[in-house]
Amino acid sequence: MILYDYILSPSCYKVRLLASLLEVPLEVRPVDFHPGREHKSAALLALNPAGSIPILVDGDLILTESAAMLAYIAGQHGPGWLAGSNPVDIAQQQQWLAFSHRLTHALGGARLVEMLHFYGDLPALQASGIAALRELEAALFARRLSGGTFLVADAPSIADIACFPYVALAPDGSVSLDIYPSIRIWMRAIRALPGFIEMPGIHRLHELAPDPFEEASL
Amino acid sequence: MTPVNPVGDGTYWTMAAKTDAQWVPVAVSADILAGTVVPARLPTGPIAVWRSATGNLYANGDRCPHRGMRLSHGFVRGETLSCIYHGWRFGTDGACQKIPAHPSVTPPKTINCGPLHVAETNGVVWAAAKEPAEPPQFYPGYEALRSLVIVSTPAAIAAATNATIIDGAIQTTLGGQDAVLLMSPQGPQEVFILVLARPNLNLADRLAVSSALEALRRSAEAVEGAA
Amino acid sequence: MMPNTMRDAWYPVGLLSGLSDDGKDSQLLGEPISVFGAKNGRPSVESAGRTLPVVERFGHLWTSLGSPNKDLFTIPEADHPERKLVDVGVVRVKCSPLRAVENFLDVAHFPFVHTDILGAESHPEVSDYKVEIRDDVDEVWATKVEFFQPQAAKSAGGGITTEYMYRVPAPTCAVLYKTCPPRPGEWDVITLFVQPLTEDLCDVWPWMALFDDESSMTDLIHFQQLIFLQDRSILENQLPKRLPLDPAMETPTRADLTSVAYRRWLKRHNYTFGAQLVAE
Ligand SMILES: N[C@H](CCC(=O)N[C@@H](CS)C(=O)NCC(=O)O)C(=O)O
Ligand code: FES
Ligand SMILES: [Fe+2]
């Protein structure tokens, strides 16, 4: 599987993160998104006329939507990460995958304006990002009331992976996460999953590694 | 609606010094897991509230004495809080215990991240910059449910609930249930709300309170928008 | 209120390879500027109807709001023809331009911010190094800075102790020279050129001149963007926003002597745009 990847792209990171959690090897092809705008080059437009990354190529299969890539990788290597046969779970998973596009547009858009000089209506992007965060917070609070940690059913799923990166990077677009306790607890649970990898702006939980000073004194 | 960005501009607004020795509601107890640190606000500025591995609660200014990094971005190991920038480690008394860049040096006693006063009642975390004379207000028969921020003013929130503010709180009903709204202004146009409800509510009733709180936010913010 | 000294310094305002002929609006030291590609055949910068002086160097366009009394600094080592010159591209950071430079001069944060790349929590020690303000060139220098690094560069195979030299040749520019894994005896050159937009907002233009025959240009850009974006989440969360020049505000240790010298040098020259002189 070849992933056309950019180290600062939250959408590409979704795919790398799930692959890492499921221990699936990926062949990564770095794309000079910034400053080179290589995703708009003839070679990459031939693969994805939409001019966006990530692009996942597996033999004859070419995927250009990260949600589809998550479904494909989970389907092959981690069926537990896909909602099973229960219609409610299936529907909720679809609901959150669709919701993740709102996050990409709003919080991702604000981030590109604030960080990489892209053009966009920053206040409007931030306002719709905040509206989405409020919905997510309310939903995760409701999940906590019934003992759940993740978005769908009892286990982490591709819905969590699809929503996590743009939420965690909201501050890059000057949208604070300080006021969403249930989102904070959910993000922490994702960051604590075995095989979790970081991306710039989302650091690891240092406390999960052994304390080097304790080690030294043993 | 203006973006909710409590610390983003780095400003410290200051209120009358008399509020320094008053308990301010800053979080729901259940929202601060053991072994984690979270950001919160006092009228005097941003704070970091953390719960040690054994479950004890501490708070300090959200600013590392080394180079000013927000300590709420740090991490908790055992009974210590570490800064994410250079890993300086602070104990429950705020004293710096370890400077990783100089592992064999014992940090001078003067390096301290400024511990604040904390208390927990009704499932609410309260903090104060100076020790208040009295314990925090107790609300018999209530338990904290959830917190959120409303981009509005206490007066507009009171108007939206048809209630009056007593001791910085509103007693009302939300989703057909008794509720107390503790309020802490976060600046001229933002109010931190912590809602208390009856502890014996079933799941559906709790969800109803939470939904009604969201509806209250919509109407309080609409009042502001119209103004 | 801004002292003239900082108006007379040179600042990066764009990548030469990325300038727009139609012009791009930007800011410098709080004043609006427009940066043009080939408006009159050559790149130019205008501010409030005035044409500003420009220099083309290190892959970037440089300008000044005042009357620079010296040429933009040079980096002779970077001229070696076998070096790869890497235009990393702009990153905007909501922080003081001076805090951005200070962070770049610091190795003690590597284990916690660039974990398992530039540092490891098991090797956090910063041993003593040499710091001086070189009066002849009017630059801050730190030399013999040694640090253990799990992956010092894209070209580094495994953990090594790396030696660094740091140089501050202009108030918002820093150059670092570090051990070059494929060429013992040579130094890789990595720079941080900062365009101060306001006192708490800056555009950072990292640039590198490296010996590396293995990695692609894209790999090198990504490695540096990875590192710098790890710093960005720190820089946007330091309080107060402006760099405190009052020594009582923060607590330096021996590992921070470069930062201490940098702050002293800023104060000496009145380079205070982005600084806070007294505690609030
Ligand atoms: N197809 C969407 C697009 C993700 C996305 O927005 N990618 C950004 C980079 S993070 C991009 O390529 N933007 C360029 C563009 O859309 O023109 C997905 O896979 O989720
Ligand atoms: S700023 Fe906290 S350890 Fe350096
Ligand atoms: Fe760094």
Image (cartoon, helix red, strand yellow):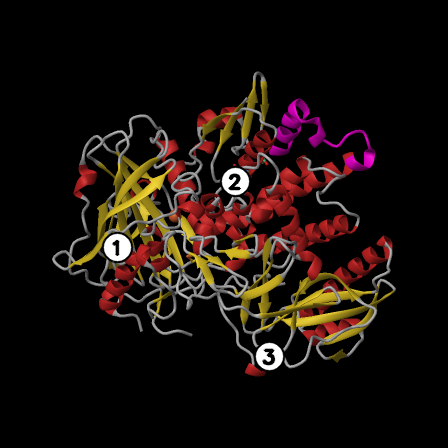
Q: Nearer the viewer, residue C118 or A128?
A: C118
| Outermost residue toward the left in this view | C136
Residue B206 vs residue B72: left or right?
right
Report x, y in % for residue C167.
Answer: 23, 51
The yes-or-no answer for disc 3 within 8 Å of ligand 2 is: no
Q: Nearer the viewer, mark 3 or mark 1?
A: 3
Chain letter for mark 3, please.
Answer: B
| Kind of residue at disc 1 | Thr
Judge whether residue C256 is colored magenta: no
Reply above or below: C267 against A132.
below
| Chain letter of the residue carrying label 1 | C
Q: Residue at x 34, y 41 (%)?
A: C148
> C163 and C176: which one is in front?
C163
Quadrant position of residue C98: bottom left
According to the picture, the residue beneath numbered tag 2 turns out to be A198
The residue sitting at 23% across, 66% down in the picture is: C5
Between the residue at mark 3 and the residue at mark 1, the CA separation in whole angstroms equals 52 Å
- Kind of residue sitting beneath label 3: Ala
Task: Give the spatial CA distance, label 2 vs label 1.
Answer: 37 Å
Disc assigned to residue C63 = 1
The segment highlighted magenta reads: A65-89
**Res B215 label:** none
Q: Residue at label 3?
A: B21
- Crowd band around label 1 with a 10 angstrom C-alpha radius: few (<14), some (14–19), many (20+): many
Let me know if residue A174 appears in the view: no
Identify whether B172 is placed above or below A159: below
Q: Does C39 sit left or right of A170 as displayed?
A: left
Residue C251 spot, x, y in % from top left: 37, 64
